[in-house]
Image: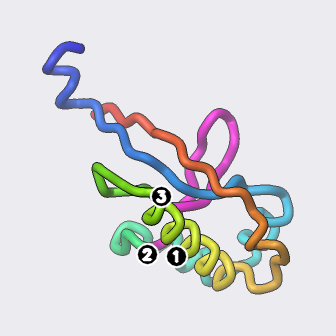
């Protein structure tokens, strides 16, 4: 790849769960989620929503260049704990599948 292009391309890993209809309804009615959406620019630990292959996901970007399975499990637990805060009435949070995928950003 051209070095000029290399400096403008960033790859980040995202870890999160797919936003299913039940989760979407709970997030829509969640005041903590709305507040987190506003504060997200200043707090890197808040969950965010992203899109990948025509689906919505809620989760975190992994900042470490090298990450381990242990780190993924910690992030998975953090995501589930925050979902409980955002959606206390949502059942089955511990059974939501967690996905890890790359996202490419070009500046």
The residue closer to the viewer here, 29 or 60, is 60
* Quadrant location of the C terminus in the rendered image: top left
| Place of residue 70 in the rendered image (x, y in percent of width and height, measured from the top left) | 46, 65
- Above or below, 66 relative to 5: below
The residue closer to the viewer here, 95 or 4, is 95
- Find residue 49 and report its image quarter: bottom right
Residue farthest to the left, as pictured: 3
Q: What is the tally of numbered marks visible in this picture?
A: 3
Left or right of 11, for residue 73: right
| Place of residue 40 in the rendered image (x, y in percent of width and height, measured from the top left) | 43, 69
Mark sitting earlier along the chain (3/2): 2
For the point 28% across and 31% down, the residue is 9
Q: Which residues are magenta?
A: 46-60
The residue closer to the viewer here, 30 or 22, is 22
Q: Which mark is residue 36?
A: 1
- Find residue 94 and report its image quarter: bottom right
Q: Residues within 10 Å of mark 3 (few under 14, many from 20)?
A: few
Q: Residues within 10 Å of mark 1 (few under 14, many from 20)?
A: some
Left or right of 101, for residue 20: right
Name the magenta segment's main secondary structure. strand
- Above or below, 83 relative to 105: below
**Residue indicated by mark 2:** 39
Residue farthest to the top, as pictured: 2
**Which of label 1 and label 3 is nearer to you?**
3
**Residue indicated by mark 3:** 69
For the point 49% across and 61% down, the residue is 72
Q: Is residue 56 magenta?
A: yes
| Place of residue 74 in the rendered image (x, y in percent of width and height, measured from the top left) | 49, 71
For the point 70% across and 53% down, the residue is 18
Q: Residues within 10 Å of mark 2 (few under 14, many from 20)?
A: few
Tags 1 and 2 in contact by the CB under 8 Å rule? Answer: yes
């Amino acid at each position: 790849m051209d070095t000029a292009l290399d400096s403008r391309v960033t790859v980040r890993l995202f870890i999160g769960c797919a936003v299913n209809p039940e989760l979407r309804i709970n997030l829509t009615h969640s005041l903590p989620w709305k507040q987190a959406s506003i504060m997200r620019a200043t707090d890197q630990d808040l969950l965010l929503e992203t899109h990948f292959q025509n689906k919505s996901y809620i989760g975190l970007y992994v900042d470490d260049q090298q990450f381990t399975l242990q780190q993924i499990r910690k992030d998975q637990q953090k995501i589930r704990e925050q979902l409980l805060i955002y959606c206390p009435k949502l059942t089955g949070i511990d059974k939501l599948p967690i996905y890890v995928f790359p996202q490419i950003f070009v500046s």
